Image (tube, rainbow, N blue to C red):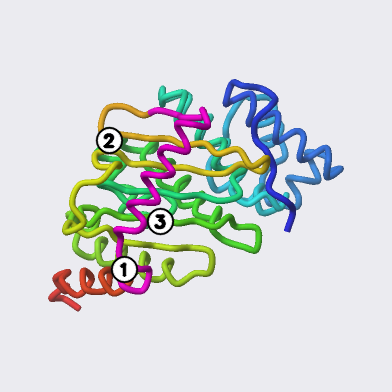
């Protein structure tokens, strides 16, 4: 599998950056637009419009392009950035998402909501709908989020650790069946090589990360970057001393959390508490 590609350094505007990457990948492969259309089963004119910035296409097309070029998750991340740009997502979060696509390792602390990389479609749909999305835009964002899970798949996947506050697992979805599916998926992912899931129980008490979700990563050049998010504010942190301080707080929380094995048992206990569908 090819090495992880950097997604920064050229166009800063998300839509233009996406179109630029599409053109670059195709020309490097030596494909014409017609050849690309024949190989992927879409009309070649669609790819021409995407490369010219006339349209972004849909997530299913972008996923097919990622598979064709051997760039798992990269184009889908850029597509999501371009779509987000149209819905006025915060610039700092857009930049973090771009950096996430090239990360060599990722750490995450969830204070109230599961990380997007571990969400099922049902969970993502309810979370995004609570944030105000609806209709076609909601479904596109759900599909894009599901595609981004490929970041944790394959031989080139970066190591990923998440620490989940117990509150995350005590806040179910409205649909018990969807909540059961989410917990089952979480239990399955926790068994993957390279993925570590830990639960921070309420009994751990107060800590340095209380009130904020934290996502941190290490880039190919060794530089650490972090993004913190509360209900109404998100902040991209690139200054080394601040990132290191967050990492120290994260290390303390990790030591307070249940072990991966104990955490998986905790998830299974939560699963047992989900009401069964009487019709099954």
Q: Is residue 258 visible?
A: yes
Which residue is tagged 1? Answer: 263
Q: Is residue 198 left or right of residue 105?
A: left
Q: Is residue 62 visible?
A: no
Locate the C terminus and report the quarter of the image it occupies. Answer: bottom left
Q: Secondary structure at mark 3?
A: helix
Which residue is tagged 2? Answer: 131
Q: Is 248 contained in the magenta span? A: yes
Closer to the camera in the image, 142 or 37:
142
Q: Main secondary structure of the magenta part?
A: helix
Total numbered labels placed on residues in the image: 3
Q: Is 114 contained in the magenta span? A: no
Quadrant position of residue 103: top right
Asked if the residue under mark 3 is in contact with the one under mark 1, i.e. CB atoms within 8 Å, the reply is no
Closer to the camera in the image, 14 or 94:
94
Q: Residues within 10 Å of mark 1 (few under 14, many from 20)?
A: many
Residue 86, relative to residue 2: is it above or below? Answer: above
Locate the N terminus and report the quarter of the image it occupies. Answer: bottom right
Q: Secondary structure at mark 2?
A: loop
Q: Position of residue 25 (x, y in %)?
A: 76, 40
Please tell me which residue is depicted at 30% across the width and 42% down the height of the picture: 209
Decide which of tag 1 and tag 2 comes sooner along the chain.
Answer: 2
Q: Which is in the foreground here, disc 1 or disc 3? A: 1
Q: Determine the CA span between mark 3 and mark 2.
A: 18 Å
Which residue is tagged 3? Answer: 118
Magenta residue span: 235-263
Q: Residues within 10 Å of mark 2 (few under 14, many from 20)?
A: few
Q: Position of residue 142 (x, y in %)?
A: 40, 46
Closer to the camera in the image, 28 or 186:
186
Decide which of tag 1 and tag 3 comes sooner along the chain.
Answer: 3
């Amino acid at each position: 599998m090819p090495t992880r590609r950097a997604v920064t350094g050229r166009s800063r505007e998300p839509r233009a950056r996406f179109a630029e990457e599409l053109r670059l990948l195709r020309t490097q492969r030596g494909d014409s637009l017609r050849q690309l259309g024949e190989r992927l089963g879409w009309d070649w004119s669609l790819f021409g419009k995407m490369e010219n910035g006339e349209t972004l296409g849909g997530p299913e097309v972008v996923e097919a392009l990622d598979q064709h070029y051997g760039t798992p998750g990269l184009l889908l991340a850029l597509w999501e950035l371009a779509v987000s740009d149209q819905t006025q997502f915060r610039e700092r979060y857009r930049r973090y998402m771009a950096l996430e696509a090239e990360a060599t390792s990722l750490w995450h602390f969830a204070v109230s909501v599961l990380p997007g990389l571990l969400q099922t479609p049902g969970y993502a749909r309810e979370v995004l709908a609570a944030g105000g999305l609806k209709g076609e835009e909601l479904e596109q964002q759900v599909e894009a989020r599901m595609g981004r899970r490929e970041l944790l798949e394959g031989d080139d996947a970066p190591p990923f650790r998440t620490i989940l506050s117990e509150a995350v697992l005590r806040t179910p979805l409205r649909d018990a069946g969807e909540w059961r599916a989410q917990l089952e998926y979480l239990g399955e992912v926790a068994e993957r090589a390279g993925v570590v899931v830990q639960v921070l129980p309420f009994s751990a008490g107060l800590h340095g990360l209380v009130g904020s979700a934290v996502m941190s990563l290490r880039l190919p050049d060794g530089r650490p970057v972090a993004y913190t998010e509360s209900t109404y504010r998100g902040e991209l942190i690139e200054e080394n001393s601040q990132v290191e301080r967050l990492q120290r707080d994260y290390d303390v929380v990790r030591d307070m959390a249940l072990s991966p094995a104990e955490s998986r048992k905790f998830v299974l206990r939560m699963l047992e508490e989900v009401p069964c569908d009487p019709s099954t």
